[in-house]
Amino acid sequence: MSVVPSLDETNKSQASIQPLIDLVKSDMGRVNDLILEKAGSDVEMIPEVAKHLIDSGGKRLRPMLTLAAANMCGYGADEIGHVKLAMAVEFMHTATLLHDDVVDESDMRRGKLAARMLWGNQASVLVGDFLLGQAFRVMVDVGSLRALDVLSTAACVIAEGEVLQLSVAQNMATTTEDYMKVIESKTAALFAAACEVGPILAGSGEDKIIAMRAYGMELGNAFQLIDDALDYGGSAAALGKNVGDDFREGKITLPVIKAYERGDAEEQAFWKRVMEERKDVTDGALDFAMGLMKKSNALEDTLEQARNHGAAAIKALDAFEDGPIKSALIDAVEFCISRAH
Amino acid sequence: MSVVPSLDETNKSQASIQPLIDLVKSDMGRVNDLILEKAGSDVEMIPEVAKHLIDSGGKRLRPMLTLAAANMCGYGADEIGHVKLAMAVEFMHTATLLHDDVVDESDMRRGKLAARMLWGNQASVLVGDFLLGQAFRVMVDVGSLRALDVLSTAACVIAEGEVLQLSVAQNMATTTEDYMKVIESKTAALFAAACEVGPILAGSGEDKIIAMRAYGMELGNAFQLIDDALDYGGSAAALGKNVGDDFREGKITLPVIKAYERGDAEEQAFWKRVMEERKDVTDGALDFAMGLMKKSNALEDTLEQARNHGAAAIKALDAFEDGPIKSALIDAVEFCISRAH
């Protein structure tokens, strides 16, 4: 977290996810085939619900990271373990989304109606459970106990993070530390695990395993910070959800924490009223909240935090020799951060 | 399924679960300690919700089966693998209960308020996810890929069964075959897996692994058939839920299928009205439904089916030499069936 690229440098980089997409393209084709196969079931509702999410155009960043990490560490292109683990990672993520929508009572997901709006909360919970089960089956099939340990630990940590988020929701006493613990658990842990299993499969040394995990963790933190900033300033199209969703749910994210900390008594009373008491949560209140964030530099500071984590992610890649994959992984960080511009 | 003990024989057996409880008592103490340890988390809500269910006095039949199966196959009492897998099996079951309550919108579980009534659907979904994650971590820790395969497959099959149950709910076109597929998936699959991992851990031969799995599967089927019969004739105390819960939820169980099949046009119209249209689902309708079940022998035939599966479970134990554990496992079958008397 020591090297912080300036905003200019980040913007100048022409950040793109394309090099990563191109490099893992052939493996991703195999992942996508396996996703469709493993979402299958004689129970019709399962592939219906699963495909609704699978087809909804997520970027599949997490499985791409698994593939890239494995490839960079020399895991053979003719092997299949990385393809299976990448699929498992995506299923873990999809299961989380299905359960999240139920927990958050969300209407939309990636710009489409959430599965729970079409098939009900019941199907969302149970199909999520099915996908999680399939993820574990496929991991077991790969046969690496260490990768299984990493991914099953991530499953626990994600759930823990979601419960923690629930505990601190609608509570303005949430600290930056609480918030960072939530996003590290609910988001960054899966990025970290997705990356870590690459060198594990490849049989790399501990230094590379630790470095790849650090890259994923820092990238995941940056990713979620940007996401939380975008909720107060992105377009619905870029987000796949509506600006202000977090605000309307009373989700305490870093921009809110910072604006609150820096607010005067009257402003703090506003935050408590809308986030804790859930009173007057109108579009006007959202505009007012965004004004307070601008005034207090809360959004800009959130982005600065994201850039710090992004820089740390890039720094972690020092453990690897230069090459096209390393370079694509650096671009991926910059792409995640540039979403905010 | 060839040997069917007569009703008299079953009753005469003084069926009791006590021999099984006594034989695995010391190992169960270790399982219970591990359950408490692994339900722990810094996120306070997790142990709160988990302990609400853990302390609610389930019989812990499934982990007892794992311990007994391992012991019977000679797995050492000084080992810990069977204790860990037994714990994992109980956590898988507990996670299913938490999610089931959300799916069924149940108010009660084991005679207490369901967790979702106290902490909300959100916590029930997420703490269930956490427990499932912990179950996998502990399984991975045991290190048997074959046991992992059996249990992760069971996790998928359970979720599949639950979704299937959802698909056939409130649909009088449900066949006996559909129903058996649901209970085999949602209930018997975990009994089967709980039993199967015992001989796997012990390194037993395929014949014993297959036999132990068959025992669990048949016992699970018998267990669920009895449960579904009790819903139309047990006391709330014996059930830990209320008589008629399935009726009020429109759950199509075997007693309903049989009464419907054997009903005249007027009776079939009644079943369609209450189970499909969910109209006039009153206590009076429940009484009337129970009358139709009595008249059509639907309950008695459901119990007969349960006895058939119980007999098949006992028959599967032929693969093992006589001894106190085998004898306790036979008693456990008869205990499950005698709950209905």
Image (cartoon, coloured by chain):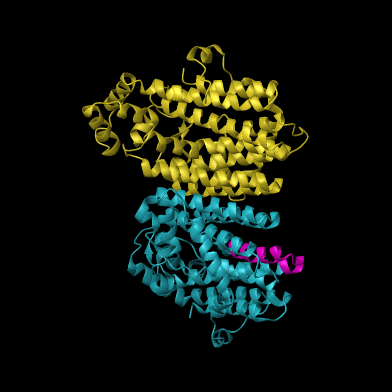
Chain colours: A cyan, B yellow
Please determine whether, in this image, residue A140 is positioned above or below residue A11.
Answer: above
* Residue B237 drawn at (x, y percent): 46, 23
Left or right position of A333 against B260: right
Main SS of residues in magenta: helix
Q: Is residue B86 magenta?
A: no
Residue B125 seen in this snapshot: yes
Q: Residue furthest left?
A: B266
Q: Toward the viewer: A166 or A73?
A: A73
Residue A263: percent from the left, percent from the top? 48, 70
Question: Which residue shows up at 22% across the image and 29% down it?
Answer: B265
Decide: is A300 above or below B33.
below
Give the quarter of the image for residue A294.
bottom left
Nearer-the-camera pick, A317 or B54: A317
**Is residue B160 shown left or right of residue A207?**
left
Q: Is residue A232 visible?
A: no
Q: Does the magenta-highlighted stretch encompass residue A199? A: yes
Would residue B100 appear left or right of B51 to someone viewing this image? left
Residue farthest along the front direction in this orientation? B2
Q: Report the residue at 49% width, 15% height from top.
A: B6
Between B82 and A142, the residue placed more toward the observer is A142
Region rendered in magenta: A190-209
**Placement of A238 over or under B197, stated as above or below:** below
> Residue A185: x and y, percent?
59, 59
Quadrant of the rendered structure where residue B212 is?
top right
Image coords of residue B7 (percent x, y): 48, 15
Give the residue at x 57% y 35%.
Answer: B191
Mark count: 0
